[in-house]
Image (tube, helix red, strand yellow):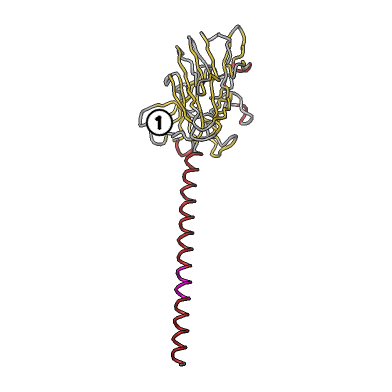
Amino acid sequence: MQTSSRQLRLIILAIFLVSVTLTTWAQAQEAAGDSQMTSVDEVLDGDDSQQGTINLTSDNQGSRIYTATSDCEVTISSCLETYGNAELSVTVNDEKVISWARSHDKDPAKLIVNGKEVAESNQEVGGGDFTPTAQKTKLKLKKGDKVTLNLTGDFGRANPHLSLTGPGIEQKDADQGSSGETVMGSGGGFLWKPISDSRGGVAVILLPPKYRHEQFNKKIWINGQAGEVLEWRPVYANGNRMHIFLKKKGAQYGGPVKIELGLAKGGKIQWNVANGAQRTEK
């Protein structure tokens, strides 16, 4: 009788241990599944939040279409510098929300956003001459909205641009120029400040935040002239941007000003400023 009772207790204990083991295994599998699902969601969220830029310039004019992959906000940057007939526009689905048309460099026409002129977009600088400045417009989009950018014209040596910065744009390294190649800089955030607040009031260049120090070889040419750098500041500030201080005030460089920066992997990136004496944002 005692032997049978002992055997029964052993059987009950064995069943209990098997049950505990199976329960623990099932919970571990469920946790692993949850962890894997979370990782997938994080990847998807990360991809959607990546910011990229579509950029149209005088060398890359025409039309481009952006489709919102989720509800989001995008930034439009526009500046219509030109010496001949030119126009730009931004259409969301079938509605034109931004437009600008000018026939020559002294044309006073201003940027129009949602039917209203933006007064500061094109200001008289004296002698009947008008100078356009870059303007930024925020647009709220719904998933599936299509935004069409258009920039065309006879620009001459002017430097117009129309860009859209937003999520879901694959940012290719087209501006990483191969050896000997010069490409145009892209991405909103470029600033030419003719008189800086430090370093004796010399001109300072702020590069778009997409650019990092390690991409450059610390060489710069202003209108083809080397040796113009006073300080290549090793930190980031004012919107996470690089700062390059030159040896002269902006007005001393005249206009137009061609700025070329050497790349660590070879080639150069170029920006153009119409007038060295004027603050310029792109």
Image quadrant where residue 128 sits: top right
Residue that lies at the very extreme toward the bottom in this rendered image: 1
Residue range (magenta) = 16-22
Q: Nearer the viewer, residue 260 or 70?
A: 70
Q: Relative to 175, is 40 above or below?
A: below
The residue beneath circle 1 is 174
Is residue 20 highlighted in magenta? yes
Q: Is residue 48 left or right of residue 123?
A: left
Q: Where does the image place residue 144, in percent across and percent down from the top left?
A: 49, 31
Residue 18 point in image, percent of width and height: 44, 73
Residue drawn at point x = 46 percent, y = 64 percent: 26
Q: Residue at x 63, y 17 (%)?
A: 120
Q: Amino acid at mark 1?
A: Ala
Q: Which residue is drawn at the image coordinates 62% and 16% (left, top)?
A: 116
Name the quadrant containing residue 201.
top right
Look at the numbered disc 1 and give the secondary structure of its residue.
loop
- 252 lies above or below 199: above
Identity of the residue furthest to the front in this view? 1
Query: What is the crowding at mark 1: few (fewer than 14 residues within 10 Å), some, or many (at least 20)?
Result: few
* Residue pictured at 46% horizontal, 33% vertical: 169
- 205 or 2, which lies in front? 2
Residue 247 location, x and y as percent? 55, 27
Viewer-nearest residue: 243 or 116 = 116
Left or right, residue 97 beside residue 215: right
Horizontal side of 266 relative to 12 (left or right) equals left
Instruction: Look at the image and say whether residue 243 sits in the magenta stretch.
Output: no
Residue extending farthest to the left is 179
Q: In the figure, is residue 137 to the left or right of 186? A: right
Closer to the camera in the image, 159 or 32: 32
